[in-house]
């Protein structure tokens, strides 16, 4: 705790003053362009990863970056997304998974979270991911299986996102765009899902093309 308190003092003394005008403007209202949905893992800092300034990102975090589909009785995810889409009018939504995700590890090995009933219940929101991996990635194990699970889960949650009425309406209008990312913690690389090729590719090599329907990616592993 002392480290955090010292950090606040440093923020107030060194970081706040140069941005004071920005914070004064933000106090009157926010206007983020992007909703960033990611895992609660402490290794991921969305603003550091994207070099975003205060006010740039509306952030939703939970274990496993799970988006319960419309009608599911889970937490406040739907309300947060609805607010971002309908009230704040964000233009983009990013779902960002990450390497070595503990939630996805628990999904693959439910015995590891058997003593955590709330976690086990929450991970049921990724049951589609678990089944896809079980039925299509039997040839993988270890880190490669976990990497495939992380990537597939991003795609599953994107599909869940599309079921939310506020999102579906904006997608029909064509003024909202969805993106699937995977962040590789140990290298700092970000991979983005390419709708055309059905693959995750390095962000630096990604060139957006004509929008098409969602395709399942192949067994290419990040």
Image: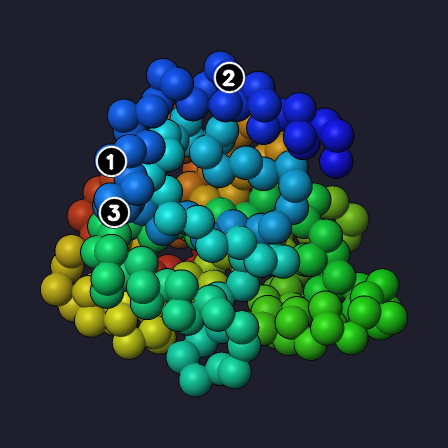
Q: Depth check: 96 or 6 in front?
A: 6
Residue 163 against residue 213 in the figure, above or below: below
Q: Marks 2 and 3: which is nearer the front? A: 2
Q: What kind of element bears circle 3? A: loop
Image coordinates for residue 180, horizontal then vertical, percent:
42, 50
Name the residue tied to disc 3.
29
Could you tell me if residue 77 is visible in this image? Answer: yes
In this rendering, the answer to whether 204 lies above or below 27 is above
- Closest to the observer: 199 or 91? 91
78 vs 33, left or right, is: right
The residue labelled by disc 2 is 13
From mark 3 to mark 1, how far is it between C-alphas? Answer: 7 Å
Q: Secondary structure at mark 2?
A: helix
Is residue 92 left or right of 205 when viewed as pictured?
left
Crowding at label 3, few (<14), some or many (≥20) Cα neighbours within 10 Å?
Answer: few
How many discs appear? 3
Direction from residue 194 to residue 126 in the image, left or right = right
Can the viewer see residue 199? no
């Amino acid at each position: 705790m002392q480290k955090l308190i010292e950090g606040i003092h440093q923020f107030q003394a060194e970081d706040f003053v140069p941005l004071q005008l920005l914070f004064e403007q933000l106090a009157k209202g926010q206007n983020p362009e992007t909703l960033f949905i990611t895992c609660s893992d402490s290794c991921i800092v969305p603003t550091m990863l994207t070099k975003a300034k205060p006010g740039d990102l509306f952030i939703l975090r939970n274990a496993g970056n799970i988006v319960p589909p419309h009608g599911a009785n889970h937490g406040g995810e739907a309300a947060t997304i609805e607010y971002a889409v309908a009230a704040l009018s964000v233009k983009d939504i990013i779902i960002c998974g990450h390497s070595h995700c503990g939630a996805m590890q628990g999904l693959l090995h439910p015995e590891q979270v058997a003593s955590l009933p709330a976690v086990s219940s929450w991970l049921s929101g990724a049951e589609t991911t678990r089944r896809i991996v079980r039925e299509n990635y039997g040839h993988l194990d270890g880190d490669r299986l976990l990497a495939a699970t992380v990537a597939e889960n991003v795609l599953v949650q994107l599909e869940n996102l599309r079921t939310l009425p506020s999102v579906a309406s904006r997608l029909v209008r064509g003024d909202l765009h969805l993106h699937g990312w995977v962040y590789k913690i140990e290298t700092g690389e970000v991979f983005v899902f390419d709708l055309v090729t059905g693959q995750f590719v390095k962000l630096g090599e990604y060139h957006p093309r004509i929008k098409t329907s969602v395709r399942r990616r192949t067994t290419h592993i990040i």
